[in-house]
Image (cartoon, helix red, strand yellow):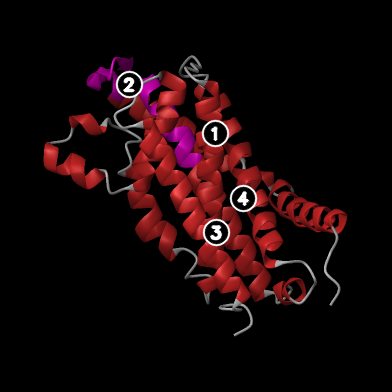
């Protein structure tokens, strides 16, 4: 089979990404609007009702403090869910096989699905940011850090969603990871509290949660407040991206969950 040229690679990648973007944008009422409504409720309940009793957190109003965490929460869940549902649907409808036997390399297939996940994650992130501006003034301490962290985090969880989609054998199995792993790690990742408030032992336990580093780094980008090393946060995010990408490429090359 003739290998693709560079221009053909770009066309293939652009086509996969366009398909993924159209997939969620056509049903924006189901994919983009609900996270914005949910975030608004978080601000009303946690930021308004509970936050007024908590007071300041790390020198910021509690309402302001939870903004980065809620944006990151929306980006993580939507990046993940977009790819896992899309890839599994492709398996279920059996048109992933056509893509796998095409001359498009598996690396481009992975990048295409990631592109769709990142597009939805960032679209929801922008929407949630707009909602947050009704409750808290938008503050950006370091724009490059904020943008890079949110993009890298979206890439990471798009990869995780793809891997879940590869191994899932039913629609029920694509909800196991978000329900029993992703959601607990997210809520325990410093979205609603500062890890510095925890006792020493639980601070050490919390540092085993990779989502904590993503939320903390993004909070530094917006508010300039950080409980952890920014360098360590970047290393952890990039390390997970590299590991998940290699793992996804290996299982697709072997046809695990796709051809078998």
Q: What residue did someone put label 2 on?
A: 62
Q: Nearer the viewer, mark 1 or mark 2?
A: 1
Q: Spatial distance from mark 1 to mark 4, Cα to Cα?
A: 16 Å
Gap in angstroms between the C-alphas marked 3 and 2: 36 Å
How dense is the environment of label 4, judged by Cα within 10 Å: few (below 14), some, or many (20 and up)? many
Judged by depth in the image, the label closer to the viewer, 1 or 4, is 1
Secondary element at tag 4? helix
> Residue 79, position in %: x, y?
56, 49
Which comes sooner in the sequence, label 3 or label 1?
A: 1
Q: Are marks 2 and 4 in contact (CB under 8 Å)?
A: no
Distance from disc 3 to disc 1, alpha carbons, whole Å, reads 18 Å
Picture quarter with the C terminus: bottom right
Instruction: Looking at the image, tell me whether mark 3 or mark 4 is earlier in sequence order.
Output: 4
Secondary structure found at label 1: helix
Give the main secondary structure of the magenta stretch: helix
The label nearer to you, 3 versus 2, is 3
Local packing at callout 3 (Cα closer than 10 Å; few below 14, some 14-19, many 20+) is many
Q: Which numbered circle lies on residue 117? A: 4
């Amino acid at each position: 089979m003739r290998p693709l040229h560079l221009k053909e690679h770009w066309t293939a990648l652009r086509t996969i990404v366009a398909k993924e973007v159209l997939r969620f944008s056509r049903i924006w009422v189901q994919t983009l609007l609900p996270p914005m409504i949910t975030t608004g409720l978080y601000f009303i309940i946690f930021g308004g009702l509970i936050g007024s009793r908590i007071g300041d957190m790390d020198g910021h109003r509690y309402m302001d403090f939870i903004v980065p965490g809620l944006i990151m929460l929306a980006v993580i869940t939507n990046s993940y869910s977009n790819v896992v549902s899309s890839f599994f649907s492709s398996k279920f409808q059996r048109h992933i096989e056509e893509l796998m036997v095409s001359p498009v390399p598996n690396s481009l297939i992975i990048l295409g699905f990631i592109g769709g996940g990142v597009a939805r994650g960032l679209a929801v992130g922008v929407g949630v940011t707009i909602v947050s501006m009704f409750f808290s003034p938008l503050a950006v301490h370091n724009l490059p850090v904020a943008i890079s962290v949110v993009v890298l985090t979206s890439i990471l969880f798009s990869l995780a969603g793809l891997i879940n989609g590869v191994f899932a054998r039913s629609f029920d199995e694509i909800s196991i990871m978000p329900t029993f792993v992703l959601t607990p790690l997210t809520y325990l990742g410093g979205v609603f509290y500062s890890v510095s408030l925890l006792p020493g032992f639980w601070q050490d336990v919390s540092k085993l949660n990779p989502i904590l580093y993503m939320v903390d780094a993004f909070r530094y980008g917006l508010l300039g407040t950080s409980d952890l090393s920014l360098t360590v946060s970047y290393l952890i995010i990039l390390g997970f991206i590299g590991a998940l990408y290699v793992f996804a490429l290996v299982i697709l090359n072997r046809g695990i969950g796709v051809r078998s």
